Amino acid sequence: MKITLDEMQAFVRVVESGSISAAAAQLDQTASAISRSLSRLEHKLAVTLLRRTTRRLELTEEGDVFLGQARGILASVEDAEEHMALRTQQPSGLLRVNAASVFVLHVLIPLMRGFRERYPQIELELNSNEQYIDLLEERTDLAIRIGPLRDSTLHARALGSSRIRVLASPDYLQRHGVPMTVEDLANHHLIGFTGLENLNSWPLRHAHGDSYTISPVIKASSGETVRQLALAGSGIVCLTDFMTQDDREQGALMEILTEHTLESRQPIHAVYYRNTALASRISCFLDYLSDAMLGQPWAER
């Protein structure tokens, strides 16, 4: 008996989701149906793919080898379906996009209604992650990366850049005073980041250089958490324009130390593995996002 695509998909989803029940929910099947698919697959292949314990599932050596092959086959099927859709000029299929939560909230979400109206046959999956991910391992079509690129194995498309500013709420400044020099920051409540120490070096010119490394009284892993802390009057932050443009225009956050702030911009790229014959669902998303960002006051090419 030959194995089926459904059996391969069940196996891959179980591995990626970490459990049979999670895979069943994603595939809109029962856990027993997924379990039977795995059993049939192992019987047909005459190997054990997964070791099942009461606490978790573990890939066997054979399972690890088959996982890579199954992923490749499923990706090829997706491509074949998409190429057929191209004949009718209707990009379609599942598009998996990964970005930092703050970029999803402030940039992607406002654009998704228009994108879906233009490309109704594309099914979107937006995933947030504050750290860089492995696109292949996470089965992600493209990721939005903010800051200098690190992975040279990826193809990248520049989308623009966003300026960094030092900000605080009017309430905080009224209670604690406005710092007039960089050195004054030592007497203020500074809010920074965990895990990304480079974000705790602010582009401020002072007596000892052009970068000021802060000692935060509060740290957070998410840029949105840092923004909300600033809006609540908890301290001074250094954040990028794409997430604070509206706050500054509405007076909820005020830029400080402008005379001491160096113009520093964070580059924004879309990264992906495919280059030639780029899937239409990916290329149309990139074109839409790139055009939309051109019209934003904070973006610069």
Image (cartoon, rainbow, N blue to C red):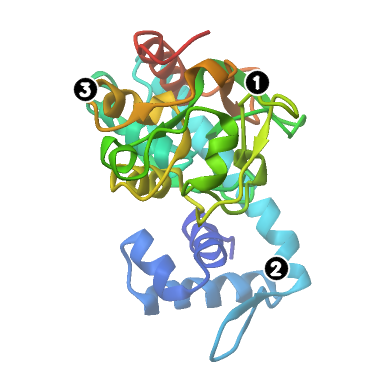
Residue at left 28%, top 39%? 174
| Disc 3, SS | helix
Q: Is residue 175 left or right of residue 134?
A: left
User: How far apart are labels 3 and 2 at the CA level?
Assistant: 41 Å
**Along the line of sight, the residue nearer the viewer: 159 or 119:** 159
**Along the line of sight, the residue nearer the viewer: 7 or 154:** 154
Callout 2–callout 1 Cβ contact below 8 Å: no
Q: Amino acid at mark 3?
A: Glu
Give the image location of residue 46, x and y in percent.
70, 75
**Who comes first in sequence, dot 3 or dot 2?**
2
Residue at left 33%, top 73%? 30
Within 10 Å of disc 3 (Cα), the crowding (few <14, some 14-19, many 20+) is few
> Disc 1 marks which residue?
275
Q: Amino acid at mark 1?
A: Asn
Give the image location of residue 141, x and y in percent.
53, 36
Give the image location of residue 159, x and y in percent.
51, 16
Residue at left 54%, top 37%? 184
Q: Is residue 60 left or right of residue 110?
A: right
User: How far apart are labels 2 and 1 at the CA level?
Assistant: 29 Å
Q: Quadrant of the N terminus?
A: bottom right
Give the image location of residue 296, x and y in percent.
35, 13
Q: Quadrant of residue 23?
A: bottom left
> Disc 3 marks which residue?
117
Within 10 Å of disc 1 (Cα), the crowding (few <14, some 14-19, many 20+) is few
User: How far apart are labels 3 and 1 at the CA level?
Assistant: 26 Å
In the displayed structure, 251 sits above or below 177; it is above
Q: Amino acid at mark 2?
A: Gly
Mark 2 vs mark 1: in front: 1
> Disc 2 marks which residue?
63
